[in-house]
Image (tube, rainbow, N blue to C red):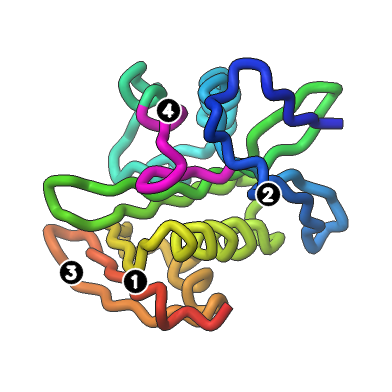
Amino acid sequence: MESIANIGLPDDYPYDHVKRITLKNGRNVLLRPIRPADRRLLIDLFRRLSPQTIYRRFLSHVRQLPEEWLDRFTLMNYKSDFALAATIEENGEEHIISVCRYHYNVYTDNTELAIVVRDDWQGLGLGKTITSNLFDIARENGIRQFEGMLDPTNEAITKIFNSIGCKYSLTLRNGFFFILIDLDTCEE
């Protein structure tokens, strides 16, 4: 099974946010903070996403993850930048099946949110669970609101926010929804 070895991890790696969850299909999934060594696992996740899921995550047709994005996605301070990965073991290897992250944007003075769930793991409650856990971590770190851009056809993401009980506003901008989520309104 997956293990959290401390080899190569930052001194401030938040082990207290590692936990196991069970999804609707009965599968056991490990939720853990992203690690600097997860670059290969993120590339593997990306390659397993459908073009539609990639578009909904990045709001463009991305063909591969640039090196600078991999740096930003794996190197964080675990306070103003945090990412949870959901991992499983397949054929004796660890695989990331979902990532939910937030990142403080110095230019907007807001914290951006992003979520992706591998297509074959969608509809099992993983999006809601990983998002709810990340919201709890954000509150612990003093974050009170998230912003983001959404594809207007992405009803799954608003369903997640509704299931968690969050109040949010949507504003149409340049063909995308700008979302603002007040974490203090979330029920869970």
Magenta span of residues: 72-84
- Rounded to the nearest whole Å, what is the CA distance between mark 1 and mark 4? 25 Å
Q: Give amino acid for label 1.
A: Ile
Classify 57 as above or below 153.
above
Q: Nearer the viewer, residue 13 or 86?
A: 13
- Rounded to the nearest whole Å, what is the CA distance between mark 1 and mark 2? 25 Å
Residue at position x 76%, y 37% in the image: 88
Would you name the residue on which mark 4 appears? 75
Q: Give amino acid for label 4.
A: Leu
The stretch drawn in magenta includes residue 74: yes
| Mark 3 burial class by Cα count in 10 Å: few <14, some 14-19, many 20+ | few
Q: Give amino acid for label 2.
A: Trp
Question: Foreground mark, 1 or 4?
Answer: 4
Q: Quadrant of residue 132?
A: bottom right
Residue at position x 52%, y 58% in the image: 137
- Rounded to the nearest whole Å, what is the CA distance between mark 4 and mark 3? 32 Å
- The tag on residue 181 is 1
Would you name the residue on which mark 2 appears? 121
Q: Name the image quarter holding the C terminus.
A: bottom right
Q: Quadrant of residue 95?
A: top right
Dot 4 or dot 3, earlier in sequence: 4
Classify 143 as above or below 16.
below
Would you name the residue on which mark 3 appears? 172
